[in-house]
Amino acid sequence: MSENRRECLQDEALVLHVKNWQTADKYAVCFTKNNGKLRFIAYGARYVKNVQGRLLQPFACLNIEVQQGQKIDKLRSCELVRMPQGMDVRQMAYGAVMAELVAVLTEDREPQPELYDLLVASLATLVKRNPRLVTLSFAIKLLGLAGFAPNFDHCTCCGEAVTGTAQGWFSPAQGGYVCDKCRTIAEEPLQSCSSGALALWQWLATLDYDNPAPFAVRGGELMEVEHMLYTFIFFQTDKQLNSLNFLNQLGL
């Protein structure tokens, strides 16, 4: 098939990841408004006079035109919609977690406009509110949109409804909550899921960034939620998140 007959698409895109490729090119992963995740090569983007190369920055919003290739797509053109917001190191580190989560939990060219809107809103909120809580909220909402959300309504072993008042446990393998009665029959180590951590998870899952409902966040429960969330994501993807290692290096 000739190059001009291959599929060509135009869309608004948020840049998730960029790295150098071969001698003068760049490899980019974007999430688009109407076409989902796209990966492509921007040929010649590392040349000093290449405008497209300067626009390809993490978290930049671009209008892109991408042409399908035999092995990988290529960028034909891009125009700036808006540059990345000014972020400090802490905010950028949490933004990198969001970007990597989208990259590993979505498939190529699966349109998810609701996820695109969530990503745009979450990145904008990073500079306004606690980035740690915003990132956790985004990750929990992303799991729901991607169809991976763990079950906290019923015990995954006996089916008993979760009341939210008793001590419970979390099983990444079972995909959710395990009541205290079923703890002894579980075949794998379980993580603590206190009533406070469960309430925090549910608050984060419905968090309105503009008008957050009042909630007292306690450090121990916050760490419980993080442990459950990132262990579950690792179980689902079998991939360690490089961005979490960066957060650890920053002491965050």
Image (cartoon, helix red, strand yellow):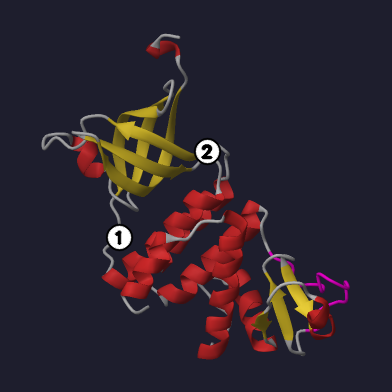
**Which residue is tagged 2?**
108
The image quarter containing residue 202 is bottom right
Residue 201, numbered label: none
**Residue at the (52%, 36%) spot, across then down:** 35
Q: Secondary structure at mark 1?
A: loop
Mark 2 closeness class: few <14, some 14–19, many ≥20 residues within 10 Å: some
Residue 85, numbered label: 1
> Relative to residue 141, is residue 8 depicted above or below?
above
| In the foreground, 28 or 246 | 246
> Which residue lies most toward the front here?
187
In the rendered image, residue 52, in percent from the top left (x then y), is placed at: 24, 36
| In the foreground, 41 or 30 | 41
Q: For the C terminus, give its image quadrant.
A: bottom left
In the rendered image, residue 54, in percent from the top left (x then y), is placed at: 20, 43
Q: Is residue 222 visible?
A: yes
Separation of marks 1 and 2 at Cα, in angstroms:
26 Å
